[in-house]
Image: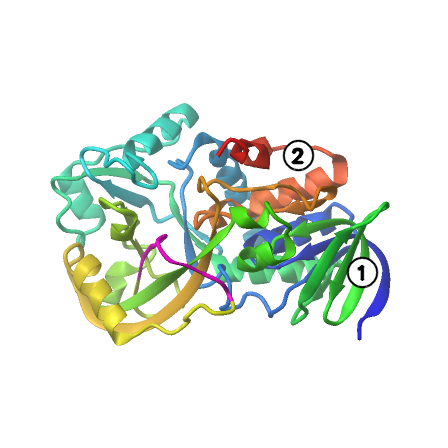
Amino acid sequence: MTTHRESVDLVVVGLGAMGAAVAYHARLQGLAVVGLDRHSPPHQFGSTQAETRITRLAVGEGPQYLPFVRRSHELWRELEATTGADLLFETGGLIVTEQEPVEGQRWEDFVTATQRVAAEAQVDFHLPAPHEVTRLCPMLRGFEDKRVGYEPSAGLVMAERAVRIQLEQAAAAGADIRTDETVLKVSPTVNGVDVVSDKCSYSADRVVLAAGPWLHELLPQPQASLLSVTRQVVYWFEVDNLATTSTDAMPFVMWVGDTDEQYVGIFPTPPGGTPGLKILGEQFLEDTDPHSVDRSVSTDEIERFYEQLVKPKFDGVHPRCVKTAVCLYTNTPDDHFIIDHALDSDRITMMSPCSGHGFKHSAALGEAVAQQITTGTSTLDLSPFKLERLAAR
């Protein structure tokens, strides 16, 4: 049986990348905040796991994203100064694509799109000669007939650590962070929003829904039908020399193939990270949900990934897989974010369906949403993420 709790300014549902950032910044802006999560974040059941995430100032997905990445970098540096934790590693990043764009790709002509965003924002992004690519990443092979772009200011963010620290800082500032509590229903009222969980009920002035792959369970139609969830697998493979894959020694690599399923990304190894080279692919063909997803990774799956995507592209990587993880992408129809009112209420904000490219923006998005809730406006422009753009689809 739930018990009633008197009103608070803000309830944040879901405390992964987006929810942790909203809770932290909303509390800094003086709101009375309750943060709820069905697990104990950072956890292994949603989208914010597997240690690290790529970050790029030159965001080929669109110029609307770059201000959020830039501000997120500033916020992570501020958190580093406050806590002493390492959150952001400027490793540089390589993007490899086909010479000619392939029709129907998720992000067509990605190097050119990245060049365009970089030029408009005066971010250093250039096309290195083959010998420079080899110097930057000696293990990379088969790229000579591809287009390759390089951003020196790109890097990695310690994703799980960033979530944990933001929640710790939010709690230290007075936010009520409640874990292992599942939200069952969110209902707008005349004067606010009622939130019912399996442990308590809340009366809030505002609510942010940042529940990732569980978000659709809290939304009505047609909003819920806009979201799909896909299973993604991350692998750590044994390498010849782990020191050559450290954040001091190599950039990340994003290799964009002929199809979405030929995408492969490699991540440098951060200090204290899993002792292996983190490599992942992506797939958007098969949907799942957080309750039924297969969180195991079979030997056949590992072998197939290694033979098809790792062995042809990277030297010095062994077939022995030392660790795997399964995470979930919550996808939108056009792969761009949705940050807008939900349940037909201007007191409820839905966010976090980020189609697999959200973490790099999360700190600044959390700040902007908290500003919008507090003052009615935000320093950075959230309008590109409104639902209305999908009305014609």
Is residue 240 in view from this perspective?
A: no
Query: Residue 393 vs residue 171: left or right?
Result: left
Contact between marks 2 and 1 (CB within 8 A): the answer is no
Report which residue position mark 2 lands on: 378
Mark 2 falls on what kind of element? loop
Point out the image quarter for the N terminus: bottom right
Query: For numbered disc 1, what is the local secondary structure?
Result: strand
Count the labels in the image. Answer: 2
Q: Residue furthest front?
A: 221
Q: Amino acid at mark 1?
A: Tyr
Q: CA distance from mark 2 to mark 1?
A: 26 Å
**Residue 134 falls left or right of residue 360:** left
The residue located at (47%, 63%) in the rendering is 49
Q: Where does the image place residue 120, in percent across and percent down from the top left?
A: 41, 24
- Amino acid marked by disc 2: Ser
Residue 278's image quarter?
A: bottom left
Which of the numbered marks, if any, corresponds to residue 25?
none
Vertical side of 28 occupied by 120: above or below: above
- Residue at image coords 62%, 56%: 20
Magenta range is 279-290
Residue at the image position 69 percent from the left and 55 percent from the top: 12
Going from N to C along the chain, the mark reached first, 2 or 1, is 1
Residue that protrudes farthest toward the top in the picture: 120
